Image (spheres, rainbow, N blue to C red):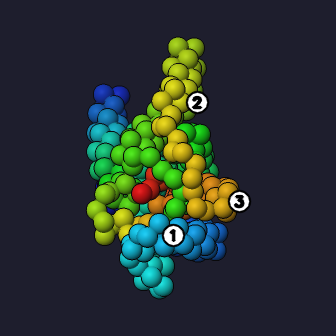
Amino acid sequence: MIARLLAAGLVAGIVAGLAVAALQHVATTPLILAAEVYETAQHVHEGIAEQAGPAFEGLRRTFATSLATIAVSTGYALVLLACMLFAGERIGPRRAALWGSCAFAATGLATSLGLAPQLPGAAETDLAGRQIWWLATAASTGAGLFALLRFDHIAAKAMGVALLVAPHFFWPTPATPESAVPAELAARFAAASLAVQASSWVLAGALAGLIWSLISRDETEAA
Amino acid sequence: MNNAAAIRTLSASRIESLKAAFVALVIGLGLVYGAGFANSETVHDAAHDSRHALSFPCH
């Protein structure tokens, strides 16, 4: 069972990751590269010797980005399969894609209220604080959605709403807006990165559900 | 198969699926954490564009 689960997550993650990496290549990476031109210009202006952006360039950079995206998509697929098993859910492509949409609402939509997706070069506050808020908000929203959608009892629904709302009383303090990157570029990037994240969750979920049901059917027939 | 035996088999398979789910959850969260959050400079540089594109907090 463990092998079957890991295989479904891995295959779904690789296929979804490759598709999302292709989407990133056309939708978000060009905006990141454009932003780095402004970031470098600001560094030159401020007399900072350090070059903007990561150490990798060209094909190596595309390869590293695609690999990271495949790792995240595999993680998403495994987390979705695991949560559906914990919940005693019947796993198939449609249900898993719905779970993926809810996961996107938790890690993408809820977190973007307090922390808009940002381009490199945008003004930012302390990283650890933002990461902790992001993780706590994603977990709380996920649990809240589960309580709201799975249980009929009024107390469970109230608890669900409380879990959805609570993190937003603790939004991280926004940085003073003094970004070198044009606002129009940043706005396009925020929208594009939410679309990329949504595709990643839904694709990982749908494929994981599909592969899981195919493998399980084969096993049942063999037995 | 009598009812008691059916319940025993059911709960045995339920326990097996919970164990598998736990392993998958740990590996899945580990992958997301490693690619999206880990502070190592090399990992950050490799995953940089992906972190931004998937709206993880970065920098």
Q: Nearer the viewer, mark 3 or mark 2?
A: 3
Q: Is A124 on the left or on the right of B16, as rendered?
A: right
Residue at 55% across / 17% down in the picture? A158
Task: Please name the residue that numbered disc 1 is placed on.
Answer: A45
Using the rendered image, report if marks 1 and 3 lie on a common chain.
yes
- The percent position of residue A4, horizontal first and vertical second, equals 37, 60
Under mark 2, the amino acid is Leu
Q: Nearer the viewer, residue A175 or A113?
A: A175
Q: Are the residues at dot 3 and dot 2 in contact (C-beta closer than 8 Å)?
A: no
Q: Could you say whether the residue bearing mark 3 is in a helix, strand or loop?
A: helix
Q: Quadrant of residue B19?
A: top left
Q: Nearer the viewer, mark 2 or mark 1?
A: 1
Task: Please name the residue that numbered disc 2 is placed on.
Answer: A149
Q: Please, is residue B35 above or below residue A87 in the view?
A: below
Residue at 57% across / 53% down in the picture? A178
Q: Could you say whether the residue bearing mark 1 is in a helix, strand or loop?
A: helix
Residue A35: assigned label: none
Q: Could you say whether the residue bearing mark 2 is in a helix, strand or loop?
A: helix
Residue at 63% across / 55% down in the picture? A190
Residue at 67% across / 57% down in the picture? A183
Alpha-carbon distance for marks 2 and 1?
53 Å
Using the rendered image, report if marks 3 and 2 lie on a common chain.
yes
Along the polypeptide, which appears first: circle 3 or circle 2?
A: 2
Residue at the bottom extreme, as displayed: A59
Chain identifier of the residue bearing label 2 in the image: A
- The percent position of residue A40, horizontal first and vertical second, equals 51, 72
Q: Are the residues at dot 2 and dot 1 in contact (C-beta closer than 8 Å)?
A: no
Chain identifier of the residue bearing label 1 in the image: A
Task: Please name the residue that numbered disc 3 is placed on.
Answer: A184
